[in-house]
Every structure is written in C-alpha cells, then in structure tokens.
Image: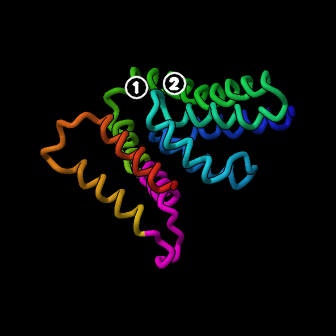
Amino acid sequence: MIKTILLLIFEFMKTGLMAVGGGMACIRFLQDMIAKYGWLTGEELANIIAVAESTPGPIGVNAATYVGYSVLSQYGAGWALAGGVIATMSLIAPQIAVIVLVARGLEIYRSSKLVNDAFGALRPAAAGLVAAAGWSVIRASLGVSFAPLHVDLVPLILYAVLVGLMLLPKLKKVHPVLFLVAGGLIGAFLSL
C-alpha cells in the first residue's frame, strides 16, 4: 500500500509540474498512468473527462481525485477518501509552487525581453498539449482506431451536427447548458 501511495504522489506531482496548458493537458499523463499501472481503463478515462467537463472545477483535479479514490479504495473506504485527497494535493502542490515562483520572478523581471520571449515560446507548446489531449478524447469517444475503415459513422455524424449547431451565428445566444444536454443525449443514444 505504501508503494501505491508513493506512486500516486510521484505520478500526480509529475503531472502537476509538467502539464502546461490546463486540465486537458493532464489527459496525456493519465493515459500514461493507464499504460503503466492499469489504474483505469480507457473507457473510465473517457467517462472521467465527460463528467469533469460538465461539472465545476478543473478537469485535472477532478480526474486526480477520482483516480486516487479508485486506486486506494481496494484498502477500504477510509483509504479511498485519503487516496482522493493525496492525488489531488499531489497534483496541485507543484502548480502552486510554480505559480508562486513565477509571480515572484515576474515582479523582478517584468520588463525583461528574455522573459517575455520565453512565455511566447510556451504558448504553442501548451496549445499542442491541449490539442493532442482533445484529439485523444475525440478518438476515444468515437471509437476511432488508426485504420480509417474502422470508424463508426453514426457518432461522427451526430458530433458533427452538434458542433455545426454550435458554430451557427444565430445560436450563439443559446445557453451553453443546452449544448451540454444535447451532448449528453447524443452520448446516451450512442450507448444504447
């Protein structure tokens, strides 16, 4: 059990430190954890992402809480709760430390061209991490394999219709909750 707790701490501290770009950037690290330790299945990860995106709070924190809770639940309910707290705190601790250090450094070097250039260079890297995570979520939700002939067209068409509706200028005044409900209905339809 101690080894599992230490692995949770290490993996989520690494994720918290390296996942630049927000919660979606954490998905790639969660996929690596699945491959290494089998803590989750790909379907569970897709479900975590779906629930975390539709609930308040960052996706990485919600996922860390679920994984920690799930991994230590085999030792009892008390350990499950502790696992959720341990994984969550391990994820956010490095981020808090980095934010404090960066904020302090920005106070000192605010006008430095080198610092401004470094932040400019981080933007495309963060965008790439988020795009890669988004693509993996799309592939998981649509059941897309690497072979183009294994794509189920029904979910692809339904998602394309939903995205198309979101892009229509007339619908920009529609409340976002309606799109969440539509996405949920599509997901329920696809799981039948």
Q: Closer to the camera, 100 or 192?
A: 192
Residue 52: which numbered mark, if any? none
Q: Which amino acid is tagged 1?
A: Leu
Q: Which amino acid is tagged 2?
A: Leu
Q: Disc 1 and disc 2: Cα gap in Å?
A: 9 Å
The mark tally for this picture is: 2
Residue 127 at x, y percent in the picture: 39, 49
- In the figure, is residue 135 to the left or right of 7? left
Residue drawn where x is 74% and y is 50% of the image: 38
Residue 13 at x, y percent in the picture: 65, 34
Helix or strand or loop: what does disc 2 sit on?
Answer: helix
Q: Is residue 156 above or below residue 172?
A: below
**In the rendered image, which residue does mark 2 sit on?**
101
**Which is nearer the N-term, disc 1 or disc 2?**
2
- In the figure, is residue 4 to the left or right of 130? right
Q: Is residue 62 above or below residue 127?
A: above
The dominant secondary structure in magenta is helix
For residue 47, what is the image quadrant? top right
**In the rendered image, which residue does mark 1 sit on?**
106
Helix or strand or loop: what does disc 1 sit on?
Answer: helix
- In the figure, is residue 92 to the left or right of 118? right
Outermost residue, front side: 192
Label 2 Cα crowd, 10 Å radius (few <14 / some 14-19 / many 20+):
few
Q: Closer to the camera, 19 or 136?
A: 136
Residue 143 at x, y percent in the picture: 52, 63
- In the figure, is residue 116 to the left or right of 3? left
Q: Closer to the camera, 12 or 99?
A: 12
For the record, the magenta segment spans: 128-152
